[in-house]
């Protein structure tokens, strides 16, 4: 993982975008604003390379060229890679998030992300972008229920707080951030929906598969027993 000071977020995001545009299937890229254990903001640029080590070294060269304050890349277990952001999202604290899949990460979108990231209300709050690409994007949109088979970025705006006095400001920040960036979003990963996201956002996660999935719900769960999330409801519940 490479770490940079927060005032370089825009510069790092630009490099992240450029790396994504030529990323091979074996390269997984993430970029975000998080905090260190002392609560100080840091820009993180971790990656996962699932090919030959020598080829991976060439891919991280542009990141090293930006002269991060920390550049610790090397072999590690997959489980360690998956839990890398664990300390940034402690178990048990209140959390409110907004998320969507961005189809573009142009200079305007980067400027918006940098602007609102600088306004995060608590050190626990974070902003993360995950690059979506590879084999998953080469399937047709009706191959599975999930319809967003695009090369893009999953943006997560995570408002987190330890003191309940910060709840209102944290939620307001996440909503304002999302309202500013939403025009560049075409879909959403449904597990990243918040409890107050409406039906239109839920539908956007399934795209053209919606009618087929409603019919399946009506057939196998007409009473909407499985409903403890932003779920597809049977036709009778949609009328």
Image (cartoon, rainbow, N blue to C red):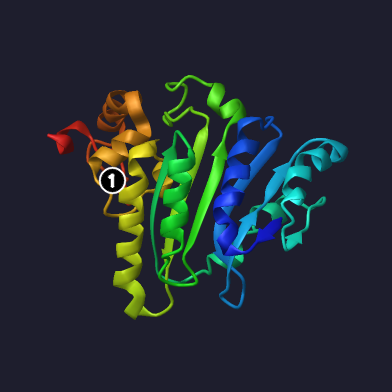
Q: Quadrant of the C terminus?
A: top left
Q: Quadrant of the N terminus?
A: bottom right
The answer to whether residue 28 shows anywhere in this view is yes
Q: Quadrant of residue 233?
A: top left
**Residue that mark 1 sits on:** 225
Residue 161 horizontal side relative to residue 54, left or right: left
Choose between 30 and 60: the one closer to the eye: 60
What is the x, y in percent for residue 56? 80, 40
What is the residue that sits farthest to the left in this orientation? Answer: 239
Residue sitting at x 30%, y 28%: 210
Residue sitting at x 36%, y 59%: 174
Residue sitting at x 52%, y 53%: 128
The answer to whether residue 229 shows anywhere in this view is no
Q: Quadrant of residue 237?
A: top left
What is the x, y in percent for residue 217? 29, 32
What is the x, y in percent for residue 121? 40, 70
Choose between 141 and 166: the one closer to the eye: 166
Q: Residues within 10 Å of mark 1 (few under 14, many from 20)?
A: few
What is the x, y in percent for residue 204? 33, 34
What is the residue that sits farthest to the right in this orientation? Answer: 54
């Amino acid at each position: 993982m490479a770490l940079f000071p927060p005032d370089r977020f825009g510069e790092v995001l630009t490099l992240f975008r450029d790396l994504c545009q030529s990323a091979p299937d074996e390269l997984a890229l993430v970029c975000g604003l998080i905090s260190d254990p002392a609560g100080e903001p840091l820009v993180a640029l971790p990656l996962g390379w699932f090919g030959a080590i020598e080829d991976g070294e060439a891919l991280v060269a542009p990141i090293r060229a930006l002269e991060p304050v920390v550049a610790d890349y090397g072999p590690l277990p997959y489980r360690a890679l998956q839990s890398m952001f664990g300390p940034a999202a402690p178990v048990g604290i209140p959390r409110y998030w907004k998320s969507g899949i961005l189809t573009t990460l142009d200079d305007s979108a980067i400027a918006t992300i940098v602007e609102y990231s600088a306004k995060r209300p608590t050190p626990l709050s974070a902003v993360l972008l995950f690059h979506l690409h590879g084999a998953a994007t080469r399937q047709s949109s009706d191959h599975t229920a999930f319809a967003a088979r695009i090369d893009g970025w999953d943006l997560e705006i995570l408002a987190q707080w330890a003191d309940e006095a910060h709840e209102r400001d944290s939620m307001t920040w996440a909503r304002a951030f999302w309202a500013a960036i939403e025009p560049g979003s075409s879909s959403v990963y449904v597990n990243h929906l918040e409890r107050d996201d409406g039906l239109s956002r839920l539908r956007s996660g399934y795209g053209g598969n919606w009618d087929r999935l409603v019919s399946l719900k009506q057939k196998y769960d007409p009473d909407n027993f499985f409903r403890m999330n932003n779920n597809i409801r049977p036709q009778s519940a949609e009328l």
